[in-house]
Image (cartoon, rainbow, N blue to C red):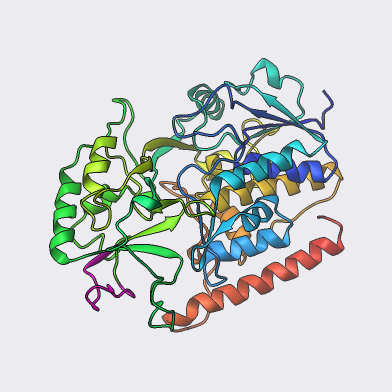
Amino acid sequence: MQPTSIAVVGGGLAGCECALRLARAGLDVTLFEQKPAWRSPAHVSDDLAELVCSNSLRSDESTSGVGLLKAEMRALGSAFMAAADSCRVPAGKALAVDREAFARSMTARVAAEPHIRRVEQRVEALDAPALAGFGTLVIAAGPLASEGLSASLAAALGTKHCYFYDAIAPIVWTHTLDRSVVFRGSRYGQENGEPAGEGDYLNCPMSREEYEVFYQALLAAQKTDARDFERQKHFEGCMPVEALAERGPRTLTFGPLKPVGFVDPRTGRRPWAVLQLRAEKINSETCNLVGCQTKLKQAEQARVFRLVPGLARVEFARYGSMHRNTYVNAPDVLNADLSLKALPHVFLAGQITGVEGYVESAACGLWLGMLLAARARGVALPPPPPESALGALLQHLQTPARHFQPSNAHFGLMPELGEKARKKERKALYAARAQAAFAAWLAEVGSRGAL
């Protein structure tokens, strides 16, 4: 192998985005992916870039951190965003995709790229024979990296790697919903002039009594157990619905089941709680139970969720589940270019670095691909400004913390505004500053030929 030869381990979002950006720059990449011979417990498809937990890429509005990040990725020519935009399904102000169509699109993009050689092989260690001779090694094995590779990475870092658990929401068949109860509508839809019966979400309204029955059943339901040597530690943004319920009876009604902005067409009044369902596919034949990621046993999921009005006879296309997510203590073990301090020729990309979320994972892979491509041309590529969504996310990986935790893209990662502003104006101010800073950076690096 030549010193500039590149191996990418993992055909998920970060791995595919990184490989495609490198190939676009004319660099030859070997992409190692363990499927179809091996699958993690959470994967069901043989395609690359499989979306495991949900089909939602969250808000597409510029007044949200992840919305800004998506806009920046589009400006950088992200393959991930191009595929997502082409496979979107109705989801109000969010960007959601037909996950099967999306994975097929990303798989086809990789297959069509002559500079990418796909090797269907499981890599169990950083010093695996298959990786011998590569000048640059990118580990984008994702949060479900095999135990062998995770152990090898931990040994190389000289410290215990961190982990947390992620939970997946159930998916149900739309035709099995009770449409005499379930109604279509968006939050604040009718207040904003939306005709009754329209909107991107299906909604299951609950009275106070109905919610109480569901809530008590949720608390009492049997949950799957972690292995004895693993301590459960959930990322706050992916808390199982039953874990949220344990915080108190109103936690869900102020969280994923909040009824604000809805009117039950049967009563003309606001429900006590609302469980929303979002289309999984373009044809809407299946729906995702929004905010109901869970670690309940499958039989318990069927019993408990069928207590929700409108779901009494619902059939499950896929039950929710729980899986291990692996990530490193990035501020301690990663250089600013995402290389390991202990092994500078090894780079990490995606959720294993400590970014959290589909979009953030792909953004990390995109950035690393850009950085390595520029380096191969002998050009320095400065990081995006911390006022931008991508720059703030990358800076999070370099910010020391007593207990480093994964993070989504959000305004709290950015520098303070430095001016007083009313709460409702702050997001717009953060967004405007981020857009200006990113545009200036993009123009500068573009003029220097760094992209």
**Residue at 48%, 24% in the rendered image:** 147
Q: x and y percent of residue 273 in the render?
A: 25, 65
Q: Answer with the quarter of the image where residue 325 lies.
A: top left
Above-or-below relation of 15 to 269: above
**Residue 267 sits inside the magenta stretch:** yes
Spot occupied by residue 155 in the image (x, y as percentages of width and height): 52, 24
Q: Residue, x 82% and y 34% (percent of image)? A: 28
Quadrant, the N terminus: top right
Which is nearer the eye, 200 or 130?
Answer: 200
Q: Give the camera-side residue of 321 and 386.
A: 321
Magenta-drawn stretch, dominant element (helix, strand or loop): loop
In this view, 59 is above or below 235: below
Q: Is residue 67 left or right of residue 326?
A: right
Residue 84: percent from left, percent from top = 62, 54
Asked whether residue 404 appears in the rendered view, the answer is yes
Where is the C terminus found, in terms of image quarters? bottom right
- The answer to whether residue 87 is magenta is no
What residue do we see at 61% from left, 61% from top?
A: 70
Identify which residue is drawn at 73% across, 58% down: 76
Q: Is residue 3 left or right of residue 268?
A: right
| Whole-percent x, y for residue 65 in the image | 53, 64
